[in-house]
Amino acid sequence: MELSILIPAYNEAQRIAPTLEDYATATSGRSTEVIVIVNGSSDETADLVRKEFLPRFAHLRLVEISDPVGKGGALMRGMAESQGQKIGFTDADGSVPAEAFLHLADSLREEGIVIGSRWLPDSHVSRKQPLPRLVSSRFFNALVRLYFGFKVTDTQCGAKILTRNVMESILPRLGATQWAFDVDLLFQIRRAGFPIEERPTVWRDVDGSKVHYFRTSMEMFLAVTRLRMLHSPLKFLVRCWDQTLGVRLFERRAERMRSIYKGTRFS
């Protein structure tokens, strides 16, 4: 199989239908699978996918995780379930249309990862983010560039495609299941010696985001700071925390990882 497209979904019953219609239709006739990973949802997301889309599209699959494991956790499970020689992921809100995503996937010709960017000169943003999200996004990108030395302009855009060899090399090393997942992914790919290529894409802001700007910004800051410390001479501080005051948090993280990979060859 040429391509696996992963779509993580947490309580997305109100937004996911147009995305699945777009992606499932655009990939019909291609050597492609579309995997929707529903994790910890309390709404009708899984039922919607099961009743409205699985009967119509044979190349669409549904994976359910009972626990809320975050976007990163859902994607890690999707990677473990995937069969394509290229593995890509996008957001359930459809902010990157299928045509633009497939263009990115087709541009990946060598081992590595290609990521879409909203901030390159040829990028097309048809509906911009609200000011609070825009400020938060640019601050986060500046922080990541400072911490990790990345040259990319947009680590958080929901359009990334990597090759299977890269995925299998770095998947066992990934540990961030929420806000730092994209940064952890890129960091581990760079550590493994694979190239990271950034390309312009098409993107639009979609209503219905469940993100709370201030709280999410703080959680993102703490997540990438912890990740940076884990890969620095200060890593002993994080490990001391995990083994003492953070032991319960560490146990929950280990349980979450078991939940993510349950029933796969990585379990």
Image: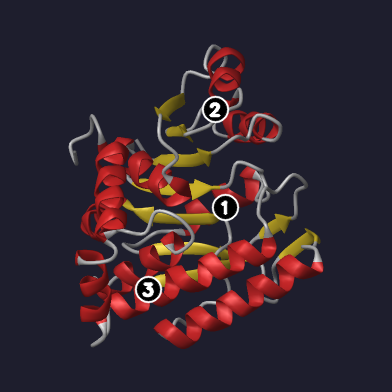
Helix, strand or loop for disc 3: helix
Helix, strand or loop for disc 1: helix
Looking at the picture, tell me which residue is in the foreground, 98 or 93. 93
Query: Mark 3, mark 2: which one is toward the viewer?
Result: 3
Looking at the picture, tell me which residue is in the foreground, 36 or 34. 36
The residue depicted at 62 percent of the width and 79 percent of the height is 139
How crowded pointer 2 is (Cα within 10 Å; few <14, some 14-19, many 20+) is rated as some
Kindly give the residue lying farthest to the front in the view shown: 245
User: Which kind of residue does numbered mark 2 sit on?
Assistant: Ser
Q: Quadrant of the N terminus?
A: top left
* Residue 65 seen anywhere in this rendered image of the structure: yes
The residue depicted at 39 percent of the width and 59 percent of the height is 109
Helix, strand or loop for disc 2: loop
Instruction: Specify which label sits upstream in the sequence, 3 or 1.
Output: 1
Q: Which residue is mark 3?
A: 226
Instruction: Specify which label sits upstream in the sequence, 2 or 1.
Output: 2
Which of the 4 image quadrants contains residue 192?
A: bottom left
The residue depicted at 67 percent of the width and 48 percent of the height is 210
Q: Is residue 225 above or below residue 113?
A: below
Instruction: Specify which label sits upstream in the sequence, 3 or 2.
Output: 2
User: Which kind of residue does numbered mark 1 sit on?
Assistant: His
Which labelled disc corresponds to residue 28?
Answer: 2
Q: Is residue 57 above or below residue 24?
A: above
User: Seen in the image, is 92 located left or right of residue 3?
Assistant: right
Query: Mark 3, mark 1: which one is toward the viewer?
Result: 3
Q: Which residue is mark 1?
A: 103
